[in-house]
Structure formats: C-alpha cells, structure tokens
Image: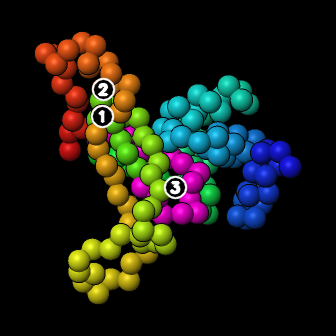
Amino acid sequence: MSSLDENRERLRAAGLRVTNPRLAVLTELTGGGHPTVDSLADAVRARIGAVSTQAVYDVLGALVETGLARVIEPAGSARRYEARVADNHHHLVCRTCGHIEDVDCAEGEAPCLVPGESHGFTLHEAEITWWGTCGPCRSAGERVGAVGFEPTTPRL
C-alpha cells in the first residue's frame, strides 16, 4: 500500500472526508520533521497547486483534533506540527537555527517521566524540550571562532 493510500485510510479511520488539501498536508507531515504552517503551505502548494494558508490551518486543526497530528510550541518559535503521535517522545531544539529532533523516551511508557509530586493529577504524558546547539551550528561557530558567535536565545 502506498503512503497516499495509507494516508487516505488514516483520514477515513479518523472520520475525516478525504480531500486533496487534507491528503497533501497529512502526506507532508508523515514524511517527517516538524514543519511550520508556512513551510507546510509551500509544500502543499508544490504538491497540489493553489491552496490558502487558512485552508492549511483548517486542515491542521482537524488533524490535531482527531489525533493524526500533534502541535509542538518551542518557546520563541512558531508552532510546529508533526505526525508522530502514537508515543510520548520529546524534542531537542537548536537555539541558533531552530532545528528540531525527536528524542525517544528513556523510561518506557507514558508519561515516561514523573514529577516528584503529582498534586492529585492523573498523569498522561510528559512533554520535555531540551535546548542546545546542533552540530552544524556548532561547527559554523567553530569556523568563525569564539569571538562574535553568540547563539540566539528565544525571547519569552
């Protein structure tokens, strides 16, 4: 079964009508990564032609609501979306370029990390973001030298 066929089935199983914009957005998301709405809109336009950014927002809203996509919101960054929803994983974010990598849970099942005190909450998942500098940005800084190379820190 092709990825398009699999994504058609995912949409139907989630109770969503299969439309070209929905299929294109889901296909882009299942390709991996953590795209923004703007980068998704560009990719969808390249795939199917004219589509409004608002239509991409609407599709993403439906995909998130039905559990086919997940929103991540790194501090100081635009919302990002991903199709990896069936597990409780975490993220590494580069403070310099904003690149995001998935990190599998080290402790097994969700919530995989627990606070010292739950304050009566029933815990479902843990959302952890580690911040640092990715290898390419670190290498670029080493080439430039330590002087004048300051990683950008997202402003809150």
Q: Which residues are magenta?
A: 76-90
Q: What is the secondary structure assignment of the residue under circle 1?
A: loop
| Left or right of 16, for residue 80 | left
| The disc label shown at residue 138, or none | 2
**Kind of residue at disc 3:** Arg
For residue 54, say whether it is visible. Answer: no
Tell me, yes or no, whether the two marked residues, 1 and 2, touch with CB atoms within 8 Å: yes
Q: What residue is at 70 percent from the left and 64 percent from the top?
A: 14
Give how far apart the Cα atoms at labels 1 and 2 are: 6 Å
Mark 3 / mark 2, whichever is N-terminal: 3
For residue 107, say whether it is visible. Answer: yes
Question: Could you classify mark 2 by the number of other residues whose Cα lies within 10 Å: few (under 14), some (14-19), or many (20 or more)?
Answer: some
**Kind of residue at disc 2:** Arg
Residue with the mark numbered 1: 133
Vertical arrangement, residue 42 with respect to residue 4, above or below: above
Mark 3 / mark 1, whichever is N-terminal: 3
Question: Could you classify mark 3 by the number of other residues whose Cα lies within 10 Å: few (under 14), some (14-19), or many (20 or more)?
Answer: many
Q: What residue is at 30 percent from the left and 34 percent from the top?
A: 133
| Left or right of 29, for residue 7 | right
**Kind of residue at disc 1:** Thr
Q: What is the secondary structure assignment of the residue under circle 3?
A: strand
Q: What residue is at 32 percent from the left and 18 percent from the top?
A: 140
Residue with the mark numbered 3: 70
Give the residue furthest to the right. 1
x and y percentages locating residue 107 in the rendered image? 42, 68
